[in-house]
């Protein structure tokens, strides 16, 4: 038995909790860099938070030029703005993009260098300036994860900085801030959260030595991650289609905020698996959103591993609300995968890679690239050699599965 739990010093979730932001920021520093984006700064809720922080904190700089997927040029510019005011605390208000940007800015402010110095696992040498993370999507879970995902123009794939030192100090998760999310952002960020839950729950368990929880970031599934993954899957399964259909459904929005946060706790420790690794090259080639890609790939990756995880897919079937009381494990697995197809279709995720413009001839190359993302691929519970990954992509391209 070897487990570890990491997370923010304080995690606050619920409607209205955003009103704590000015106090939490003021207690963490006196010169704040607020990171957000243009769309969000125009939202009344976010503008109000910025105004309230200005009343409590001596020096406030706002970087609102964050653009999707954290290009390195955004990092340079945000670091310069932070330096101008000598920021000693960062407040990130936004989706995964904004929070990931704030994480790497905090690293560079404290430790210098460039993002490239920190690519990979456990390369950040120590704590950063305090980060208060406020998600406006549900979501990546970035408000509590040890991960920042960046886009480097010199690399074909996105790059990750993973370190316990970039777990935000405070996560303030207020569902009200997600009410303005447009339909596609709700669908794509929501299915990303569902993938975090399911990929964690089905991640391959691994044997560990006592130093691994400090030297490695992702450790495979364990009993703690299972618990959070199932709580997350249940909430997201019952509420994501509702939130997509009606963005004003406050009950569904609350479930999604809570669910994405729980999924974040699960994958912060277990890690994600093949859908995430395979989405990296596919997202880079097609410029499609992260959530759309991982959601599309999920049923094919699970199907390819069904022999290893039938018992787990049967549990997921029950947790996601299917009546499988009298079903055999194989029947429950089939029921779950069939339900998943309908779930994805309902929120507008295309069924095949051909639908999003992937060229079939590229599939072996994409599988090769994904197989290099060892920290994720080693979590895939089925065969994970390059030929098996190519087979998953082939199935996802044609739409063929075993059932
Ligand atoms: N750090 C992690 O642990 C982690 C995990 C998964 C994904 N990611 C990364 O996160 C990024 C995706 O994040 P995301 O899905 O949250 O989307 P995002 O942050 O890229 O935002 C997508 C769009 O939605 C808009 N938006 C966000 N909140 C809104 C709101 N409340 N109202 C109106 N518009 C809003 C943004 O302005 C943006 O245009 C990717 O780069 C992905 O690789 C990180
Ligand atoms: Fe993700």
Image: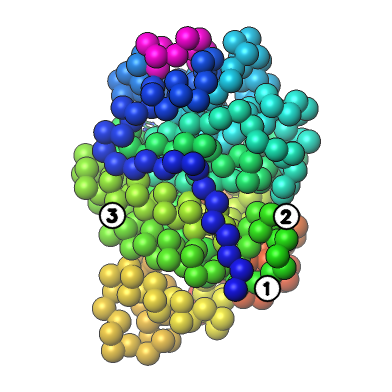
In the rendered image, the quadrant that contains the C terminus is bottom left
Q: To which residue does mark 1 refer?
A: 207
Q: Is residue 50 left or right of residue 201?
A: left
Q: Nearer the viewer, residue 331 or 313?
A: 313
Q: Can you give x and y, in whole percent of width and height, for residue 250 in the image?
A: 22, 43
Q: To which residue does mark 3 refer?
A: 239
In percent of the image, x 73 and y 29: which residue is there? 111
What is the magenta range?
53-62
Question: Element at badge 1?
Answer: loop
Q: Which mark is residue 244?
A: none
- Measure the C-alpha gap from mark 2 to mark 1: 14 Å
- Measure the C-alpha gap from mark 2 to mark 3: 37 Å
Is disc 3 in contact with disc 1, using a CB cutoff of under 8 Å? no
Asked if residue 337 is positioned above or below residue 98 in the image, the reply reads: below
- Measure the C-alpha gap from mark 3 to mark 1: 35 Å
Badge 3 residue CB within 8 Å of ligand 1: no
Question: Element at badge 3?
Answer: helix
> Of marks 2 and 3, which one's residue comes earlier in the chain?
2
Asked if residue 118 is positioned above or below residue 332 in the image, the reply reads: above
In percent of the image, x 53 and y 31: which residue is there? 131
Q: Can you give x and y, in whole percent of width and height, for residue 20 in the image?
A: 34, 28
Residue 119, picture quadrant: top right
Residue 170 is a magenta residue: no
Query: From the viewer's perspective, is the residue at label 2 or at label 3 nearer?
Result: 2
Q: Can you give x and y, in whole percent of width and height, for residue 122 in the image?
A: 72, 47
Residue 54, picture quadrant: top left
In percent of the image, x 65 and y 36: which residue is there? 127
Q: To which residue does mark 2 refer?
A: 215
Asked if residue 231 is positioned above or below residue 66 in the image, the reply reads: below
Asked if residue 20 is positioned above or below residue 244 in the image, the reply reads: above
> Of marks 2 and 1, which one's residue comes earlier in the chain?
1
């Amino acid at each position: 038995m070897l487990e570890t739990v990491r997370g923010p010093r304080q995690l606050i979730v619920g409607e209205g909790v955003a009103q704590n932001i000015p106090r939490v920021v003021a207690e963490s520093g006196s010169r704040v860099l607020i990171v957000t984006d243009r769309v969000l700064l125009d939202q009344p809720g976010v503008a109000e938070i910025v105004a309230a922080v200005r009343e409590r904190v001596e020096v406030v700089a706002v970087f609102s030029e964050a653009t999707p997927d954290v290009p390195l040029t955004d990092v340079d510019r945000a670091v310069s703005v932070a330096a101008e005011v000598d920021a000693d605390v960062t407040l990130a208000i936004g989706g995964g993009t904004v929070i990931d940007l704030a994480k790497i800015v905090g690293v560079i402010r404290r430790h210098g260098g460039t993002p490239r110095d920190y690519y990979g696992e456990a390369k950040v040498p120590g704590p950063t300036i305090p980060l208060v993370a406020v998600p406006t999507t549900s979501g990546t879970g970035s408000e509590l994860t040890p991960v920042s995902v960046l886009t480097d123009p010199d690399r074909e794939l996105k790059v990750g900085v993973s370190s316990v030192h970039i777990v935000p100090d405070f996560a303030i998760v207020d569902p009200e801030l997600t009410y303005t999310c447009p339909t596609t952002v709700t669908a794509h960020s929501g299915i990303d959260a569902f993938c975090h839950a399911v990929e964690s729950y089905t991640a391959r368990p691994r044997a560990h030595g006592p130093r691994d929880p400090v030297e490695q970031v992702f450790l495979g599934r364990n009993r703690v991650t299972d618990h959070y993954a199932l709580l997350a899957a249940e909430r997201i399964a019952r509420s994501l289609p509702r939130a997509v259909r009606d963005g004003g459904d406050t009950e569904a929005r609350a479930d999604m905020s809570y669910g994405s946060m729980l999924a974040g706790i699960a994958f912060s420790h277990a890690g994600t698996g093949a859908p995430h690794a395979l989405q990296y090259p596919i997202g880079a080639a097609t410029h499609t959103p992260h959530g759309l890609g991982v959601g599309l790939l999920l049923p094919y990756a699970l199907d390819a591993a069904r022999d290893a995880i039938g018992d787990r897919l049967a549990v997921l079937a029950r947790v996601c609300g299917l009546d499988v009381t009298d079903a055999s494990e194989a029947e429950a697995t089939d029921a779950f995968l069939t339900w998943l197809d309908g779930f994805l279709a309902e929120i507008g995720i295309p069924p095949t890679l051909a639908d999003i413009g992937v060229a079939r001839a590229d599939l072996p190359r994409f599988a090769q690239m994904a197989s290099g993302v060892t920290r994720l691929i080693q979590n895939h519970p089925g065969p994970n050699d390059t030929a098996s990954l190519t087979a998953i992509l082939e199935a996802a391209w044609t739409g063929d599965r075993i059932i």
